[in-house]
Amino acid sequence: MEWGNRRWSNQDSVLLIGLGLLVIGLGWGLKKPSTNFNNKTEIIRVTPTLGQVSEVEVWAEISGEVIRPGVYKFKGSARYNDLLVSAGGLGPRADREWVELNVNRALRLTDGVKIIIPRVGQKLEPMGQVAGVETTENISLNQANQAKLEELVGIGPAMARRIIDYRTKNGGFKSTEEVKLVEGIGEALYNKIKDQLVL
């Protein structure tokens, strides 16, 4: 076969076929997806969905005969037992019998609560209730929720909220009379509710 003035040879045919295969191979290589991922890890970020709410923080104080007395912060689902554990447990002089009678370790902590662990032989003012348990006779200034505080004569939703705000800001009430420092609670109102109040 002739090409212009040049005769086409078998060698030229082989060369042409080789070039064709080379072009096809390059085209295939460009289309073929790479399988070399260089061992990179894909990072997947999860966006929180609407409606997810973080737990409320609860601040609680424990003092007296524990290893590490102080103020501790928990999530809203914390229990009295969590407070005791955070404080390192009962000290060697702690009145364990008093603890068994006055502290319900399974109950949830309420914000602003304070508990004092006495030593053996130490006399504390009666709590009037097991720590964390509110009764109809006595209402704890340091533990009662808003609904419970509203059971007091003359205490409405706004006043109950101010009591809770005060104890949170000041680390709890040190005496029942301290409630008179809450805006709107004077001597007259205090005298009506004082017999129901405990710390």
Image (cartoon, rainbow, N blue to C red):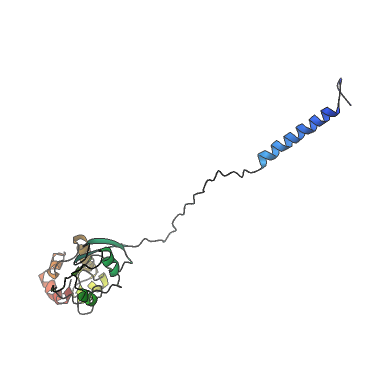
Q: Which residue is located at x 73 percent, y 34 percent?
A: 22
Q: Residue 121, percent across and down?
A: 13, 74
Question: Going by the image, does 56 lie left or right of 140?
Answer: right
Position above or below: 1 against 118: above
Residue nearer the viewer, 134 or 184: 134
Asked whether, in this view, residue 191 is left or right of residue 97, the answer is: left
Residue at 15 percent of width and 67 percent of height:
179
Q: Residue 150 appears at what percent x and percent y?
A: 23, 73
Residue at the bottom extreme, as displayed? 137
Closer to the camera in the image, 139 or 84: 84
Seen at 28% across and 72% down, the residue is 105
Horizontally, residue 174 falls left or right of residue 77, namely: left
Res. 103 in view: yes
Q: Quadrant of the C terminus?
A: bottom left
| Image position, residue 102 (x, y; %) | 22, 75
Q: Which residue occupies the extreme right position in the image?
A: 1
Residue at the extreme top: 5
